Amino acid sequence: MVGESTIKWNPFAPDYFNDPYPIYTLSRQSNPIQKDQFGNIILFKYRDVAPILDSPDFEVSSLSTFFESKESYIFKNSSACPFLAKTTSKWLMYLNSDIHRKLRIALGKVLFSYDFDRLIQEAAQETIIHFQFHKELDLVDFSKYYIYHILKKFIGLKDFASLEKVVEYSNMAARSQDIFVSKQMYLKINDCLLWGQGLFAEDGFKAKLVKELEGFEFEEEDYYSILAVTLMAFFETSKDNLSYSLFNILSIPRLRDFVLKAEVKEIKIITEELMRFNSPLQFTVRINKKEVTLMGQVYPIGTRFVLGIASANRDEDIFEDADEIVSNRQINPHLAFGSGIHTCLGALIARKELEFGLKPMIEFLQKFEIDNSHSLLWGNQIFMRTLDKAMVKIH
Amino acid sequence: MEYKNWLITQIASEASIAVEEVDCDVTFDQFNLDSLAIVSISFEMESQFQLENVDPSLFSEYNTINKLCVWLENQQ
Ligand code: HEM
């Protein structure tokens, strides 16, 4: 029965951001279907999460509509121009039906018109060269540098769009989707999204997008919305995934040795395993279009289900030694990229970032060790788990 | 008193009512607050009183201004 157990997922508990996995585990064991104070139903087990992602009876919940309903509250005593609903109006992961399908095809065409293999390989070399004389470095900075240099090569940024600015913009866009966000934070995000209109160059990616979307009657703000979501989706999760992957590989000698010796095929296998283990997007949301029954409980149409992707990816019923990084895990049906019609559009690119990056990066980074005088710093984010700092120093 | 006045001002502003209308023994759910309001007040409370990680579900347990004041006093 929902809610009777004393085990409760509580992202405000001390230490939650450092490690949310213990409460995921307890929840799977003792209270896998929970209801929070706002009526959200939170699911932790693979057997509940995976079928919902694939089911036509569920749809995504519109972020833009949420902002439309909240803007009068958020901007009540503020002179800022409301820009949250507008910026998020074409964010693919929050669109349903026809517009989702059409936009997904168009964005996919533009994205895959780039020679990512080359862009990624070049960026890996540039990153290693950039950090070659460092005696200590932050793996998060290292990862940001790499992903930013891939991003910059295809999305077309104006000159002033420095790494720092892109980092902040991407993070604000990521936070706009989190659960339990205060209006003060929304105001900050709104400022950043307004400012970000000047980030993108007119030629290249945007010009291709405009061409691909001929006939959609989109306006300037719609293109901006698509550019914003592409930047965020591209930058944020990839950077989070890489920084935590590098940290784990450098922390565990057997993984480091595995990567150093690995052939392409083995790199592909460990890439999947790192995705499962890290699950940068820890949760997503779905709404049911039909009444559903889970464990004997009936949920009316329109219930908000918060799907614990990261928890499902550590479910012992599916993954043996789920809390370990098993470098040669053969069967790995993880959900880190989602599943079903909203499956990550950039999954291939994200995979290549590790496939081309891991080995040369670990070859370079093997002279470093984790600097235990600095603890790992995690961002206060629930949906997109993000590492803020992970220092390493030369042996 | 500091806590009480501060909470009254916050609730009045969030619920768009006058401070005089705020009853300290009425439960928060009767103020017709936006669902984001509790998270926003928690956030303000953190910075105002230098608290760490204020859990918004606090407002369900200490569900009136008077009850929440007792909680706040015990934090110092
Ligand atoms: C390790 C890196 C990444 C992870 C873990 C990740 C994860 C995800 C997940 C879980 C979803 C599905 C969300 C849902 O079903 O609600 C998603 C959707 C999406 N991702 Fe990624 N992503 C990554 C990298 C990327 C990259 C590099 C791009 C490039 C543009 C990208 C673009 C998108 C887009 C556009 C969607 C929306 C797809 C749709 O709704 O049809 N992602 N991502």
Image (cartoon, coloured by chain):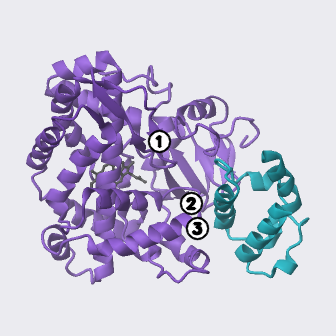
Chain colours: A purple, B cyan
Element class at badge 2: loop
Tally the numbered discs: 3
Residue A199 rendering spot, x and y as whole percentages: 26, 70
Is B31 above or below relative to A390? below
Residue flagged by tag 3: what amino acid is it? Lys
Q: CA distance from mark 1 to mark 3?
A: 22 Å
Residue flagged by tag 1: what amino acid is it? Trp
Circle 3 packing at 10 Å, graded few (<14), some (14-19), many (20+), is many
Q: Chain of mark 2?
A: A
Would residue A295 be seen by someone viewing this image from the given angle?
yes
- Would residue B51 be found to the left or right of residue B4 on screen? left
Q: CA distance from mark 3 to mark 2?
A: 7 Å
Q: Which mark is residue A183?
A: 3
Residue tagged by mark 1?
A378
Element class at badge 3: helix
Residue tagged by mark 2?
A181
Is A256 above or below relative to A195? above
